[in-house]
Image: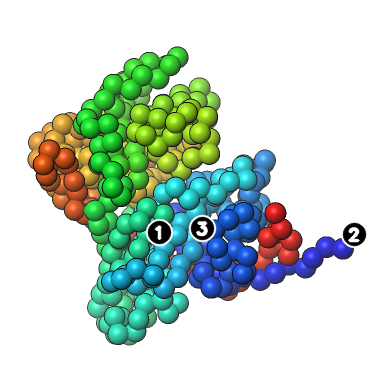
Amino acid sequence: MTHQPQIKIPATYMRGGTSKGVFFKLDDLPQAAQVAGPQRDHMLLRVIGSPDPYGKQTDGMGGATSSTSKTVILSKSSQPDHDVDYLFGQVAIDKPFVDWSGNCGNLSAAVGPFAISNGLVDADRIPENGIATVRIWQANIQKTIVAKVPMTDGQVQETGDFELDGVTFPAAEVGIEFISPSAQDEAMFPTGNLVDDLEVPGIGTFKTTMINAGIPTIFLNADAIGYLGTELQSDINGDDKALNMFETIRAYGAIKMGLINSVEEAASRQHTPKVAFVAPAKDYVASSGKQISNADIDINVRALSMGLLHHAMMGTAAVAIATAAAVPGTLVNLAAGGGDRNSVKFGHPSGTLKVGAEANLDNGEWAVSKAIMSRSARVLMEGTVRIPGDALIV
């Protein structure tokens, strides 16, 4: 039998926030993968090493977690007043599936630096020293993201002293603004309510806040599902009964949010919506051993991504947290103490994060003009990634 040799594809492996992913320029991809479709999906699956029944992604670039099984495709923007188009693909680990239904807020921090370093931003928009403002069109959700990228001597500044819980080493701070992060042409609260009763057959009925901001998210109270809100990954990710409960809640919540029509459809939409649970501020010990005091935070939040408790917090879910906290009466706002607020500092399994949002009530509908947070990013490796030559054959 004759086997095709491997092919090389220019690629960059980057950390953005608490995630890692393989970044590509659109015009560097094989011709068949430059358009959406089975060939592109098959190529990205092979790059990452999925589907892997062992759950390890040993034969690819993936890191066997939802935070490290990610791909990004970038190109010069087709939109006016934007610099770069950003397309995100969440690659399933054990299934032959790439989910294009949402954004990755963490990797959004790496988009600006990559775009500058790879010639996707016009030179006259990049200062020799100071802060470069990169206007990003998030193609999955049709939204604008603005990245504030530090520059030194004409190069992206990656090193620095900004510390981000969930990332071991400090780096340069990248400011991220998510502009009007609610879903396009949809209400921020899709049911029209700040709090709903969600009936989940066989499990129970729960108070929920369901929001479209950053990423569609279903918030529950921790005590309603038997948790404290201070849990770490080890408390949940080895508990199949708990994971099945969360997935069932996610499926029925997705139906109520109008994202899917049947429970069965949830299996093909793993990236969205997210499920998170909240609790008033409590002391706990983070996964790093760091002591988190209730005096240092407003609220505890835990969120699941791709079926497992996240080790820190997804950037898009942080946008949902900031937005919900800014709207009086949501479960997030109430757990944080209630009232008017334009920022919230929350505890997550790896530590803490402060996020801000500007929300307002307009003709009876809540809207958020932008959500703000800081992240960091850096290049881990660049060059070419190799995949077998038949990887584009579907």
Badge 1: residue crowd in 10 Å (few <14, some 14–19, many ≥20): some
Give amino acid for label 2.
Met
Q: What is the quadrant of residue 386 in the picture?
A: bottom right
Locate residue 74, reporting x and y percent.
46, 67
The Cα atoms of the two marked residues, 3 and 2, are separated by 32 Å
Report helix, strand or loop for mark 2: loop
Asked if residue 185 can be seen in this view, the reply is yes
User: What is the C-alpha distance between the residues marked 1 and 3?
Assistant: 14 Å
Depth check, front residue: 343 or 134: 134
Which amino acid type corresponds to the residue marked 3 in the rendered image? Thr
The span from disc 1 to disc 2 (Cα, nearest Å) is: 41 Å
Q: Residue at x 30, y 81 (%)?
A: 126
The residue that label 2 is drawn on is 1
Query: Considering only order in the chain, which callout, 2 or 1, is on the residue closer to the N terminus?
Result: 2
Which residue occupies the foreground of this view, 240 or 290? Answer: 240
The amino acid type found where label 1 is placed reads Ala
Q: Are marks 3 and 2 in contact (CB under 8 Å)?
A: no
Q: Secondary structure at mark 3?
A: strand
Residue named by callout 3: 71
Q: Please give the residue where the numbered disc 1 appears in the rendered image.
A: 139
Q: Earlier in the sequence, mark 3 or mark 2?
A: 2
